[in-house]
Image (cartoon, rainbow, N blue to C red):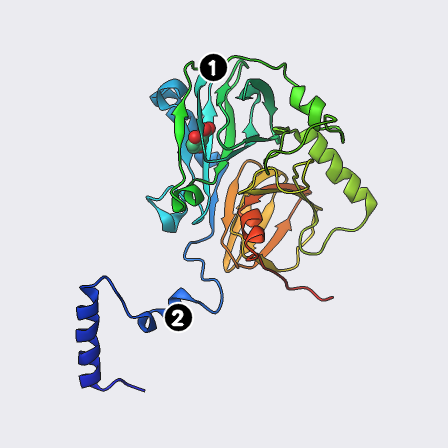
Amino acid sequence: MSTPSTGGNARRDFYERIGGLSMAPLWEQLHQLVPPQPKPGYVAAHWDYAQVRPFLMESGSLITAKEAVRRVLILENPSLRGTACVTPTLYAGLQLILPGEVAPSHRHTQSALRFIVEGRGAYTAVDGERTLMHEGDFVITPSWTWHDHGNDSSGPMVWLDGLDIPMVALFNAGFAENGADDAQAVIAPSGTADARFASGLLPVDWRPGGQTSPIFNYPYSRTREALRGLERAGPPDPCHGWKLRYVNPATGGAPIATMGTFMQLLPKGFETAPYRSTDGTVFSVVEGEGETRIGDVTVRWRPRDHFVVPSWTTVVHRPSSEAVLFSFSDRPVQERLDLWREQRLVDA
Ligand code: GTQ
């Protein structure tokens, strides 16, 4: 039904007058505000490491890690340019640290995850304990913990940074401080957190103080072994292959309150059943080659590539060799808010 033109004019005039009081009519935008289903408003994207790496290395000759504080090339969603967002709730970037460099100590309320993409033996220090990082390791920097990164190895080190920067910005809850020294004092030998928390044991009188995991390095060697064990134990899930989520061993929840992290093994020649969920997800390819259909876009990937799958967009993975994919999303937040949904488009 068309609106009578006089009515239209009367309405426009009304909107203008209430606009003077900082008010607006809901009925003009109800459908966008309360959509029947998610419309992501951002797109699938793929970063080919062969194309990205030369620019990363070039950034290493433009600025030092110390001057940059964090020498990172942000992975910006093509439809969210200028926002530093890979999805509306997540930030992703590739950080480079060259031999001998230190990324100075600071802390912030944003939580960070590191997923090691290239290199071995650089360290991250969290609250006075260092951990050496290797390809495929998943390392966390909990909210408001002091952290610095250093590379005492002989090669460049690159990792994927995942942070909850957009979420913290939405809540206007960002605080940050710089440390007194570039590298914080080491107060606990490497391996202390593992000894206390990573062996199916907890210190006898310890109680979790929050949601964040007391383990801060989840090494790939152990993750890969777990996937191998699952493969021997039974058939792959039609939508996920063999997929595990990282946990805080003290709570069973995600290691970081705001970001869920996952690792999945897909057998050679497998085609996953179509699947979608409300958590937009960033993938880092660890092993293998293949392609992933994301809605009507197909990306072809190799190790060290990254790609992003928007919310509620159907995904099908087609590995041409055995493949291992790391991923992270805002799923724990959506689950806590009772918002998370998934749809498995597979015969029962
Ligand atoms: O390592 O602390 O990619 O604070 C962006 C912001 C990394 C970090 C980023 C950060 C960091």
Q: Quadrant of ligand 1?
A: top left
Residue situated in front as seen by the camera: 292 or 261 = 261
Quadrant of residue 273 within the rendered picture: bottom right
Percent across and percent down for residue 118 are 55, 27
* Picture layout, residue 324 above or below residue 272: above
- Amino acid identity at mark 2: His
**Which quarter of the figure is the N terminus placed in?**
bottom left
**Mark 1 residue element:** loop
Q: How dense is the environment of label 2, judged by Cα within 10 Å: few (below 14), some, or many (20 and up)?
A: few
Residue 171's label in the rendered image is none
Residue 55 visible in rendering: no
Q: How many marks?
A: 2
Quadrant of residue 324 within the rendered picture: top right
Residue situated in front as seen by the camera: 60 or 173 = 173
* Picture layout, residue 148 above or below residue 49: above
Residue situated in front as seen by the camera: 325 or 300 = 325
> In the image, is 270 to the left or to the right of 331?
right
> In the image, is 190 to the left or to the right of 153?
right
Tell me the residue that label 2 is attached to: 31
Q: Which residue appears at 48% of the width and 69% of the height?
A: 36
Residue situated in front as seen by the camera: 244 or 257 = 257
Q: Mark 1: is the Cβ under 8 angstroms from ligand 1? A: no
Q: How dense is the environment of label 1, judged by Cα within 10 Å: few (below 14), some, or many (20 and up)?
A: many
**Which quarter of the figure is the C terminus placed in?**
bottom right
Tell me the residue that label 1 is attached to: 183
